């Protein structure tokens, strides 16, 4: 008991400067908004992180495919790779990027002795660079398959998972939630994260971080290139029309569903059914994923307390309620699709 009290005092002393700073910064905001504020710090450098994963008796060969252009500020991509080498020493690390990167920076990464795939960029990037994502993800996953990976993560060069338990957790998610609707094509569920997966966006499974059996991942990341321009689609008039336009993550998910013999009907009921039966959504916090883009200091950017909005994230709790209790929903608010993204849902 004495040692616990001593540790608690030591901890309080350590965080005293943070307490003073947070009080100075957040107290005026809390008073102004009549709310509570929290904050969280993550180290930038892998060398300052001392956490580690549990030792396992059996560990299926798993690849981490880091795709996209290099994030050089704060050595973000390089430090992510260094962290993964420490946290996941048995994983296959693959950087799938583009020819023509900063030669000095790519040399630093080569010195980490990981697999590097450099591809030529396509002539047409597509809406929101969708074709870049298809090609770099596909090339990285093909390398993972060739190297004997049974499972694979597809993540981004500008995102970082800090949890050393992430890979074990992801594999255990597949064990805990086997496919309900089995078919001869899909082996196990496709797992994604709550960040940019939306409950009221049709088939809007986040494409940022995706995990699964290597064969399922290759199936997911091998759609045809999307040769449409932004002028060809309606992305703003309503959530329904965004879904019907099938761009980016909706394109990936619906193309995958068609491959496993599920034809999307473009209704909220069918979208929820697809989430429950073919996918799994985990919380961003489960793998401690950080994304320093757009709103990096607003971590819960799609959590709302004033109203239920059609831009709310599909969390693990929401996914579990669909998985277990979809048939217990008194109604499915299809009318939420007629609104623009971010508007209130009335049930």
Image: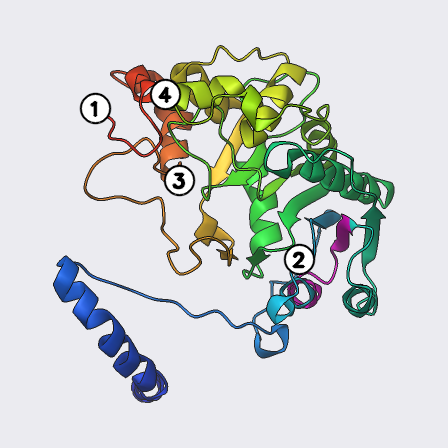
Q: Which residue is mark 4?
A: 326
Between marks 4 and 1 in the image, the one whose residue lies nearer the viewer: 1
Question: Relative to 209, is 310 on the left or the right?
Answer: left
Q: Which mark is first along the chain, 3 or 2?
A: 2
Pointer 3 residue: 315
Q: What separation in Å lies between label 2 and label 4 (alpha carbons)?
A: 35 Å
Of 86 and 111, the residue lying toward us? 111
Bounds of the magenta segment? 80-97
Residue 21 locus on image (x, y percent) = 29, 80
Residue 105 seen: yes
Query: Which badge, 4 or 1, comes first in the chain's sequence?
Result: 4
Residue occupied by mark 1: 346
Residue bearing mark 2: 56
Disc 3, SS: loop
Viewer-closest of 7 and 281: 281
Disc 2 versus disc 4: nearer the observer: 4
What SS does tag 1 mark? loop
């Amino acid at each position: 008991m004495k040692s616990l009290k001593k540790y608690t005092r030591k901890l309080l002393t350590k965080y005293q400067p943070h307490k003073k700073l947070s009080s100075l910064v957040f107290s005026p905001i809390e008073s102004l908004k009549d709310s509570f504020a929290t904050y969280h710090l993550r180290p930038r450098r892998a060398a300052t992180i001392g956490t580690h994963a549990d030792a396992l008796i059996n560990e299926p060969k798993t690849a981490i495919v880091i795709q996209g252009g290099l994030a050089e500020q704060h050595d973000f991509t390089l430090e992510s790779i260094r962290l993964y080498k420490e946290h996941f020493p048995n994983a296959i690390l693959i950087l799938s990027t583009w020819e023509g990167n900063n030669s000095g920076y790519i040399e630093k990464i080569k010195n980490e002795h990981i697999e590097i795939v450099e591809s030529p960029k396509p002539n047409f990037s597509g809406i929101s660079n969708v074709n870049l994502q298809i090609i770099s993800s596909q090339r990285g996953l093909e390398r993972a398959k060739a190297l004997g990976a049974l499972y694979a993560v597809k993540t981004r060069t500008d995102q970082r998972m800090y949890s050393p338990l992430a890979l074990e957790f992801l594999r255990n998610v597949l064990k805990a939630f086997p496919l309900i609707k089995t078919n001869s094509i899909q082996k196990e569920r496709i797992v994604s994260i709550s960040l940019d997966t939306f409950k009221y966006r049709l088939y809007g499974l986040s494409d940022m971080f995706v995990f699964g059996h290597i064969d399922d991942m290759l199936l997911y990341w091998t759609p045809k290139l999307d040769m449409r321009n932004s002028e060809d689609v309606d992305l703003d008039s309503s959530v329904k029309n965004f879904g019907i336009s099938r761009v980016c993550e909706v394109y990936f998910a619906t193309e995958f569903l068609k491959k496993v013999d599920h034809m999307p009907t473009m209704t909220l009921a069918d979208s929820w059914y697809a989430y429950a039966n073919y996918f799994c959504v985990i919380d961003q916090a489960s793998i401690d994923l950080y994304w320093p883009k757009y709103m990096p200091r607003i971590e819960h950017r799609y959590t709302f307390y004033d109203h239920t909005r059609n831009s709310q994230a599909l969390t693990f709790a929401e996914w579990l309620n669909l998985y277990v209790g979809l048939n217990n929903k008194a109604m499915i608010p299809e009318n939420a699709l007629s609104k623009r993204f971010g508007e209130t849902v009335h049930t």
